[in-house]
């Protein structure tokens, strides 16, 4: 379901009104600050982390630096995780290894039940509180998230007949991948990857929060927690929200470009709708 | 020595050129469930140039394996598979295959399905579009109406027409059809049979078709091969005038019915022999 701009504006206004009302009932900025308090007091306070007096410009500067570092770590981890997850998931489901699919399928299915955030201490233990622990953890969690989806998409989306059809038409391995495997699995794989893109922020937050490296949005969240500053926590949560929306937007643009390059511009969309 | 092997050697002596020759071909493969299956077990068959051969037989008799082996999708474990005129090489560009079931790409439009092979061959886009329109017309579909449609927007009969057209995109010399009319209603089946016969007569293409439908084999083929246990058990020449699918020729129905009865008896006998061998 896609909301129109009017619905988004109305629901946002309703949410802010509800928040204001709840803050009024609480009477405590420590438990639930009002939107006005967050905007006028909590947000400018971020400038203090840069050794500046509280100001919007300083706060945005500080938030941008920490956001950029977190985005960099999360993106690198996501790319590594997607590359490994999609490759392994696809390979174990290729028609040539169908015989092994049943056995491997049990293991792949079990991955879904792993408590992903429970692995954070393990990564801190392995990598200490270096940035590599965040990247490693995001990659690891993304692999576990993407691999079952990729395996299922490849197994369900690709029919051996399509591969045979391409082979008798003279397609080589690359043409089979690009013209058969990719377009047939993409409609099934896309939701998993989109989900991974939105979750990479949660993975990075968890790893930064627990690992406490020097910079990153997770570090700011940890410091806000130490100071029991609910206002700053809300600012960080909203920053994550905006970053998540922006990353989904970027993902959608990249997929549209890749689809056009594949020559499936309209067909993928219409095929997906019909499917 | 089997009858079919004798027939291959006799043809060679008579100087009749064959498009495909199989001599004692064996082919084993492993199923998705890990079972080893001997799909072809000493299969010998010659497909004369510009003729049509129909392979009939019970389920799991090796018909589809035969077709896939000729198409190059299954390796030959023993025996000889040759394409006279091409040496030991398989003329991949000259083979058009229509598989059982969904023999198209559902995420591509009709136009892009028809031009898939041409895309791989590096044809320019304008040429591909022109050829796709030609192919659409060849199978009786209006290009302006159907080229932009998706397979999910076509009926079963229209899908088969599109799939037949796909096999013709690169002007093949050998046409391999696996149960081309299975799953269609009576009228659509008749239409597709007429289309296949018309395309065969127009192009003079060598055709190997696999079918469960014996009357269809008699209507479309010059030679019916009865298959059982991975080998050809009997060959029945069909010497009836063409076109046979148009109807209206006096006496043809009776001749067809007689041949159908004869082939069914051979199939039952072949199945009995295979069972006894097991």
Image: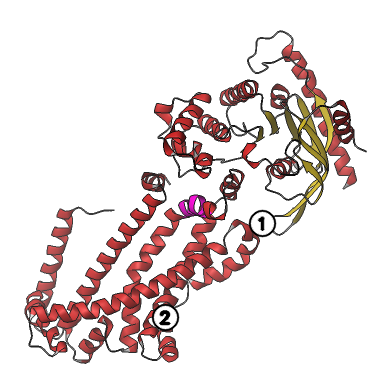
Identify the residue at image location x=31%, y=89%.
Answer: A212
The residue wearing badge 2 is: A136
Q: Which chain is home to disc 1?
A: B
> Looking at the image, which is closer to me, A31 or B111?
B111
Tell me whether the residue at label 2 lies in contact with that at label 1, contact meaning CB atoms closer than 8 angstroms: no
- In the picture, measured across the screen, residue B74 lies left or right of residue A103, that is right
Mark 1 residue element:
loop
Is B168 or B37 nearer to us in this picture? B168
Left of B197 or right of it: where is B16? right
Residue at the spot x=69%, y=46% of the render? B72
The N terminus of chain B, quarter of image: top right
Q: Is residue A229 above or below residue B114?
A: below
Dominant SS type (magenta)? helix
Q: Residue B9 at what x, y percent from top left?
A: 88, 33
In the displayed structure, does residue A121 sit left or right of residue B226?
left
Judge from the rendering whether residue A193 lies leftward or rightward of residue A56; answer left or right.
right
Q: Nearer the viewer, mark 2 or mark 1?
A: 2
User: How would you rate the neighbour count of disc 2 (Cα within 10 Å): few for under 14, some for 14-19, many for 20 or more?
Assistant: many
- Residue A181 counted in the magenta span: yes
* Residue situated in front as seen by the camera: B167 or B257: B167
Chain ID, mark 2:
A
Q: In the displayed image of the protein, which residue is found farthest to the top?
A: B250
Q: Position of residue B186 (x, y in %)?
A: 59, 25
What is the spatial separation of the Cα atoms under label 2 and label 1, in whole angstroms? Answer: 36 Å
How many residues crowd around disc 1 within 10 Å: few (fewer than 14), some, or many (20 or more)?
some
Element marked by disc 2: helix
Compared to B78, does A43 lie above or below? below
Residue at image position (60%, 47%) is A167
Magenta extent:
A177-185
Figure quadrant of residue A124: bottom left
| Residue at numbered disc 1 | B32
Q: How many marks overall? A: 2
């Amino acid at each position: 379901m896609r909301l129109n701009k009017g619905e988004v504006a109305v629901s946002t206004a309703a949410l802010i009104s509800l928040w204001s009302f709840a803050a009024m009932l609480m009477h405590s900025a420590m438990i639930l600050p009002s939107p006005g308090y967050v905007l006028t007091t909590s947000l400018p306070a971020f400038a203090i982390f840069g050794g500046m007096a509280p100001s919007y410009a300083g706060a945005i500067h500080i938030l941008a630096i920490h956001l950029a570092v977190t985005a960099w770590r999360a993106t690198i981890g996501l790319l590594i995780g997607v590359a490994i997850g999609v490759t392994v998931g696809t390979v174990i489901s290729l028609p040539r290894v169908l015989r092994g699919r049943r056995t491997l399928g049990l293991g792949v299915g079990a991955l879904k039940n792993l408590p992903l955030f429970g692995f954070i201490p393990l990564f801190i233990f392995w990598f200490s509180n270096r940035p590599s622990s965040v990247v490693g953890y995001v990659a690891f969690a993304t692999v576990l998230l993407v691999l079952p989806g990729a395996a299922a998409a490849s197994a369900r989306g690709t029919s051996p007949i399509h591969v045979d059809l391409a082979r008798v038409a003279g397609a080589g391995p690359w043409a089979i991948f690009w013209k058969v495997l990719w377009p047939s699995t993409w409609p099934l794989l896309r939701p998993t990857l989109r989900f991974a893109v939105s979750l990479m922020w949660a993975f990075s937050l968890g790893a930064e929060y627990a690992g406490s490296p020097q910079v990153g949005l997770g570090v700011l969240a940890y410091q806000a927690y130490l100071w029991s500053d609910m206002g700053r926590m809300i600012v960080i949560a909203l920053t994550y929200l905006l970053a998540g929306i922006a990353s989904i937007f970027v993902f959608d643009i990249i997929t549209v470009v890749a689809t056009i390059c594949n020559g499936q511009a309209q067909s993928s969309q219409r095929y997906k709708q019909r499917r | 020595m089997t009858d079919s092997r004798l027939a291959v050697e006799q043809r060679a002596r008579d100087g009749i050129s064959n498009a495909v020759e199989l001599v004692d071909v064996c082919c084993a493969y492993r199923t998705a469930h890990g079972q080893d299956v001997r799909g072809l077990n000493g299969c010998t068959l010659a497909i004369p140039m510009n003729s049509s051969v129909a392979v009939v037989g019970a389920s799991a008799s090796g018909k589809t394996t035969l077709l896939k082996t000729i198409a190059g999708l299954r390796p030959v474990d023993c025996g000889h598979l040759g394409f006279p005129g091409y040496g030991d090489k398989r003329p991949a560009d000259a083979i058009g295959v229509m598989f059982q079931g969904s023999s198209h790409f559902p995420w591509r439009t009709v136009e892009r399905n028809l031009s898939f092979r041409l895309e791989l061959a590096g044809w320019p886009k304008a040429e591909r579009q022109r050829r796709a329109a030609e192919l659409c017309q060849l199978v009786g579909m209006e290009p302006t109406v159907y080229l932009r449609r998706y397979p999910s927007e076509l009926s079963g009969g229209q899908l088969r027409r599109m799939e037949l057209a796909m096999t013709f995109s690169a002007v093949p010399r050998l046409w391999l059809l696996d149960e081309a009319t299975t799953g269609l209603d009576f009228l659509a089946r008749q239409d597709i049979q007429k289309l296949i016969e018309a395309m065969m007569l127009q192009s003079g293409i060598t055709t190997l078709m696999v079918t469960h439908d014996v009357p269809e084999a008699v209507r479309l083929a010059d030679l019916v091969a009865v298959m059982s246990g991975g080998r050809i058990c009997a060959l029945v020449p069909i010497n009836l005038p063409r076109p046979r699918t148009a109807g209206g020729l006096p006496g043809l129905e009776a001749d067809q019915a007689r041949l159908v009865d004869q082939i069914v008896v051979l199939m039952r006998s072949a199945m009995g022999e295979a069972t006894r061998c097991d």
